[in-house]
Image (cartoon, helix red, strand yellow):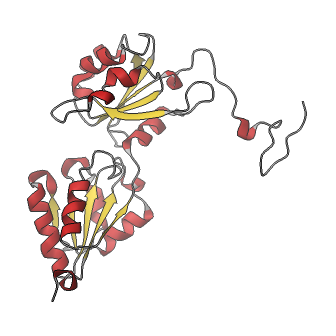
Amino acid sequence: MSQKATINGEVIFVGAGPGDPELITVKGSRALERADRVIYAGSLVNPELLRICRPGTPIHDSAHLTLEEVVTLMDEGTKNGETIVRLHTGDPSMYGAIKEQFDYLDKQNIPYSVIPGVSSVFSAAAAVRREFTLPEISQTLILTRLAGRTPVPEKEALAKLAKHQASMAIFLSVQDIGSVVKELLEGYPASTPIAVIAKASWPDEEILLGTLETIEEKVKAAGIRKQAQILVGDFLDPANGYARSKLYDPTFTHEYRQGTAT
């Protein structure tokens, strides 16, 4: 009998959302309810979400595990017919290290699926009540990170991306805010507004607003070293205003409405 025929279980990758347990999707919550085993991303996932699981469900904190140990749990569980939820913070597709897990599952013919989640980048925008895509200000959002122990391709260096002066969200970089500011100043004016949102949507969420001239001092004074989104761009505070959206402009005609003459 082939190995594929012996596997009766499945792995479901679920985005836990940014922190607030109510921000997991309904589909993600239902997957947790029926899970036979959960492997979750340690301190980055709100432990309140684990209360959704059935009592007695085996739960593994992947912060203490290697990739090999994680996939061994998946392999053993699915061969026993288990539905395994791999619970990732935010949305699994952003810095979730999921491709290497997919590759292993593909090689072992283990079925898997992905349920997306609310990324911290969007929770951060909600926290500061801003829109990334303001007409005539910015229609592009760049999601990136500063190079660290995980390198960034040279073509994606923060200084090069900054030259676009688009709306930008920077992950996993607040611990080196000085370098972030230095790189951003290669493209943005020093007066460009910037926000740092620590633990967006958690009860102890913290918001710092400033400019590229002032934010480093504020971040260091607040002692923020991790779990923070950095948002930068004129969308945060459009000094010269922004254009009204055509979608709801009474003079604009589209498929669902005939515009009126001014």
> Which residue is at the front of the view, 6 or 73?
6
Question: How many labels sit on residues?
Answer: 0
Which corner quadrant holds the C terminus?
A: top right
The foreground one among 39 and 186 is: 186
Quarter where residue 78 is shown: bottom left
Vertically, is 133 above or below 82? Answer: above
* Among the 4 quarters of the image, the one containing residue 258: top right
- Single out the residue that lies furthest toward the bottom: 1
Q: Quadrant of the N terminus?
A: bottom left
In the image, is 52 to the left or to the right of 41?
A: right
Residue drawn at (35%, 18%), measured in percent from left and top? Answer: 184
Residue 228, percent across and down?
Answer: 30, 34
Please say if 205 is above or below 49.
above
Report the residue that reaches farthest toward the right. Answer: 261
Instruction: State the image coordinates of residue 74 (x, y, percent, origin top left).
Output: 17, 69
Residue 133 relative to residue 249: left or right:
left
